[in-house]
Image: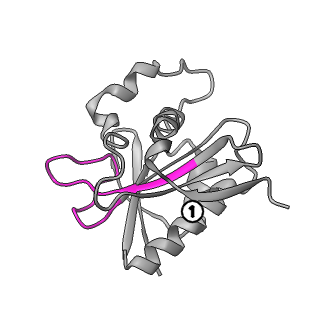
Amino acid sequence: MSLYTIKPITEQDEPFLWDMLYESLYVREGEEPFSREVIKESFLSKYVENWGRDGDLGYIAVGNTGQSLGSVTIRYFNENNKGFGYLSDDVPELGMALVKGYRGQGMGTALLTRLFEEMKRIGIKRVSLSVDPNNLPAVTLYQRFGFQEVGMVDTSITMVADIG
């Protein structure tokens, strides 16, 4: 029996998406974590604010006792409001995070598999993301899903995958 289920994100999940936005900020070993306030800055808040707008899609892994354990989302941005992994207006950007203690157990793979199935079903052709190259578990997971490096913004690599 699985220790979690995957469900579509609803409006009620927005507070958890804020938690996951914070969890998605990679901090190198030995470095000071970011202040929680940073997720309110517009360059980050745009990933969660007003969740449920046209084109937003995502899933949450929910444990057997009802606790949310991780999320994967896609959201469209435009030239005037680029995300860190922005490629073009018609390529959504992926965001993903898992609660500490639940990483490395296949949940990220399950979330991405479900998202890729739905993107394929609704006709999304490509998806991009931004990841710190030092976050090797994440980079490795994304590569398994066909993501390839296409550029760099600040200290993060931009990756893109074709949805086949």
Residue 155: image location, x then y, percent: 39, 39
The residue range painted magenta reads 71-92
Q: Residue at x 57, y 43 (%)?
A: 135
Q: Residue at x 65, y 61 (%)?
A: 109
On-image quarter of the N terminus: bottom right
Residue 132 visible (yes or no): no
In this rendering, position of residue 143 left or right of residue 150: right
Residue 65: image location, x then y, percent: 76, 43
Q: Residue at x 37, y 74 (%)?
A: 124
In this rendering, position of residue 164 left or right of residue 38: right
Tell me the SS state at disc 1.
Answer: helix
Residue 41: image location, x then y, percent: 30, 27
Instruction: Report the label total.
Output: 1
Residue 68 against residue 32 in the figure, above or below: below
Q: Does residue 57 belong to the magenta stretch?
A: no
Q: Nearer the viewer, residue 68 or 109?
A: 68
Q: Residues within 10 Å of mark 1 (few under 14, many from 20)?
A: many
Residue 5 against residue 164 in the figure, above or below: above
Q: Which color mode does the image show? A: one colour
Residue 11 visible (yes or no): yes
Where residue 128 sits, quadrant-wise, is bottom left
- Hey, which residue is sitting farthest left in the picture? 80
- Hey, which residue is sitting farthest front in the picture? 12
Q: Nearer the viewer, residue 155 or 127?
A: 127
Residue 67 against residue 38 in the figure, above or below: below
**Residue type of the residue flagged with mark 1:** Leu
In this rendering, position of residue 108 left or right of residue 65: left
Q: Residue at x 64, y 52 (%)?
A: 61
> Circle 1 is placed at which residue position?
112
Chief secondary structure of the magenta portion: loop
Residue 116: image location, x then y, percent: 51, 70
